[in-house]
Amino acid sequence: MSVADFLPDDLYLYRQDAPHAAEARPIGQGDVFVDIPLVRAAQRKDRHPTQFTAPVKSGDKSLGIVVSHPCSSRSRSTHALKESVLLAPVVRCPDGFEAPWTGYYEYFPLPGLREDIDYVADLSAICPVRSAYLEGQRVACLTDKGLAALFYRLAVNFLRLDRIPDDYSAEAERLCYETNLWELWTRRKGTEEGFQAWLDEEFEGEALEDETGNAVLGSEERFGISRRAGLRWHYEEIQGELEQELDQE
């Protein structure tokens, strides 16, 4: 089994050669950034062998992809990005690594990422990057299927778990649903704040349908769960609730 078995044709939800892609979309796992400082492994100083220095790569050829899960990269109380998040450097695809992308477990393929050139995320060189340096520098976001493929590659590289459990796809879908709604909220309100609290409110429920298949207004049956808990199974209904609320403002 190789990553090609899970790498979708629609890998990118957004992709452009120059920043900034998807301005209203909150930063999340699987987002690719350019011109960001990437710290490399520390080296001893020649004249001071007890001291170390860490080289930093930057500039328009310095790309990285967020590998931190949102639960790790954002504050539990404010939901704002933490001071730094983990990114894997994104580099030109090495010679000999091509579809169907077998071997090279430390690489996650990003075909056609920029100027139709193939790149890879180097999972062996993950490093922290200050969140402030990501502002306005995004060039790509993954689809839910692309995110599931990234989960698979992370598992294979770090655990050699050469299969993709169903919950990889389920978690990727859930994260994308949440971020899609958050992006809608941010675009309309001009701020990320307030969305997570709204998502934790009770889900109004799914409306009954009449004989023609149309929803009957006011027939919603509450399930006693939050919108967050019902997101995977009732995404369209929750999206409708959000759009209705935003239209009323």
Image: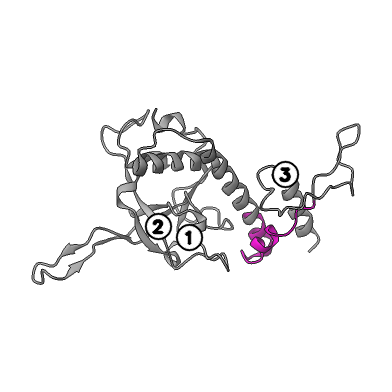
Residue 54 quadrant: bottom left
- Kindly identify which residue carries mark 1: 73
Q: For this view, does 123 lie left or right of residue 178?
A: left
| Residue 115 seen in render | no
Between disc 1 and disc 3, the foreground one is 1
Please tell me which residue lies in front, 104 or 19. Answer: 104
What residue span does the magenta drawing correspond to? 183-204
Q: Is disc 2 placed on a helix, strand or loop?
A: strand
Please state, as top left, top right, bottom left or bottom right, where the N terminus lies in the image.
top left
Crowding near pointer 2: few (<14 within 10 Å), some, many (20+)? many
Q: Earlier in the sequence, mark 1 or mark 3?
A: 1
Q: Earlier in the sequence, mark 2 or mark 1?
A: 1
Amino acid under label 3? Glu
Residue 216 lies, in percent from the top left, at 89, 43
Tell me if residue 192 comes above or below residue 106 in the rendering: below
Task: For the residues labelled 2 and 1, say whether their Cβ atoms are less than 8 Å apart.
Answer: yes
Residue 152 quadrant: top left
- Kindly identify which residue carries mark 3: 236
Amino acid under label 1? Ser
The colour scheme used here is one colour
Q: Distance of mark 2 from mark 1, alpha carbons?
A: 8 Å
Q: Earlier in the sequence, mark 2 or mark 3?
A: 2
